[in-house]
Amino acid sequence: MPTTYPIVVIPGDGIGPEVTAATLTVLEAAGAPLEFHKHQAGLPAIDATGEVLPETTLDAIRTHKTALKGPCTTPVGKGFRSVNVQLRQKLELYAAIRPVRSLEGVKTRFDGVDLVVFRENTEGLYAGVENAIVPGVVTSLKIVTEKASMRIARAAFAYAKQRNRKKVTVFHKANIMKLSDGLFLERVDKVHREEFPEVAYDTRIIDAGCMKLVQDPTQFDILLMENFYGDVVSDLCAGLVGGLGVTPGANIGEDCAVFEAVHGSAPDIAGQNKANPLALIMSAVMMLNHLHELHGDENVKQCANRIKQAYNAALAEGDKTYDLGGTLSTTEFADAVAKRV
């Protein structure tokens, strides 16, 4: 009997349950050897348990090691803390990896984009340490440590070496934040110099780097940066290839990994069968490739390849959802991919 791998499935809220169901349809059509364990986070978890991220969900991920997660709502300026931030911090998912590439059939201003954003995922401004000093005055503490800086640097350089990528570029603001970004930059340079000297490497001040990105993204390959910058720049990069609906994401730690669509929960279209499930389908392919790297199971790798070829073919042949100028619903797009697997 083929080996099956337990996966925690978190549908999330908003459009999350719809794109998650569509993704499971594609995985099942591909014959992916997965065993799904559904758990809640976000608004449904609050309704069921009073907690936005129940300990039972965290324990399930710790047990099964791998999760596929739909988007969860994060209130703006008030309310509960982001589910994503809590997952990353509580499970030490230190590396956010977001591949961004041009897709045939998705017309944008640029061709040939092939980037990977590596974002430190556990500290920086997103550590969430904020204080109201006096009425009208708030401070937000940016935390940068040697350990986290070197850990994400090793992940990025190792990825570049394993996949024969061309170059790692660090985006930073060490000219202004000389201590925090300075420490990050120094430790990345140390990892490169002492452990990965064969990998091409350079640095850019982030504002100039963003300008260069939108002028010619093909001059970059792997982008490495701290948490807040990585969040902003990964969305900017998504805009180069068609938006957040076509860009996947992985959150990797020493013991666990959570794969997710990087877009929001889009409550304005929730329940209307309009959302594009491609980002989560692509994230599921990343998940399968991760399982292959862990276990060396060629069956898993073949499933990943079949799904990737199927959604590439669907897009190239004009099967697209509304956000990409097409007419297909969430379920129709999932079916279009599933029939090509």
Image (cartoon, rainbow, N blue to C red):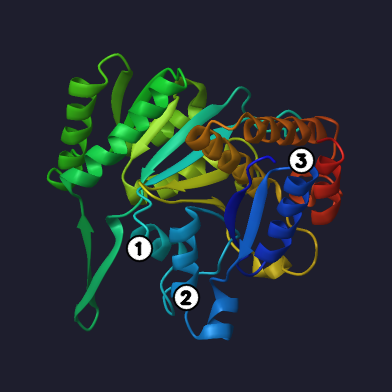
Residue ID at (55%, 69%): 73
In which quadrant is the N terminus drawn? top right
Which residue ends up furthest to the left in the rendered image?
A: 179
167 vs 315: above or below: above
Horizontal side, residue 310 vs residue 115: left or right: right
Q: Which is nearer the eye, 44 or 237?
A: 44
Is the residue under label 1 in contact with that under label 2 (CB below 8 Å)? no
What mark, if any, has residue 54 been given in the picture? 2
Task: Residue 30: give its label.
Answer: 3
User: Under tag 2, what secondary structure?
Assistant: loop
Which amino acid, by three-letter code, is at mark 1? Answer: Lys
Q: Residue at x 24, y 24 (%)?
A: 192
Q: Residues within 10 Å of mark 2 (few under 14, many from 20)?
A: some
Residue 70 position, x and y percent, is 60, 59
Q: CA distance from mark 3 to mark 2?
A: 31 Å
Q: Which residue is mark 1?
A: 90
- In this view of the protein, which residue sits in the foreground, 266 or 213? 266
Q: Position of residue 60 (x, y in %)?
A: 49, 64
**Residue 114, percent across and down?**
55, 26
Rendered position, 285 above or below 124: above
Q: Residue flagged by tag 3: what amino acid is it?
A: Ala
Callout 1: SS: helix
Along the line of sight, which residue is nearer the eye, 70 or 172? 70
Q: Looking at the image, which residue is at 46% across and 31% down?
A: 213
Query: Alpha-carbon distance for marks 1 and 3?
Result: 32 Å
Q: Residue at x 55, y 78 (%)?
A: 45
Q: Residues within 10 Å of mark 1 (few under 14, many from 20)?
A: few
Q: Quadrant of the C terminus?
A: top right
Which amino acid does the dot numbered 2 rest on? Pro
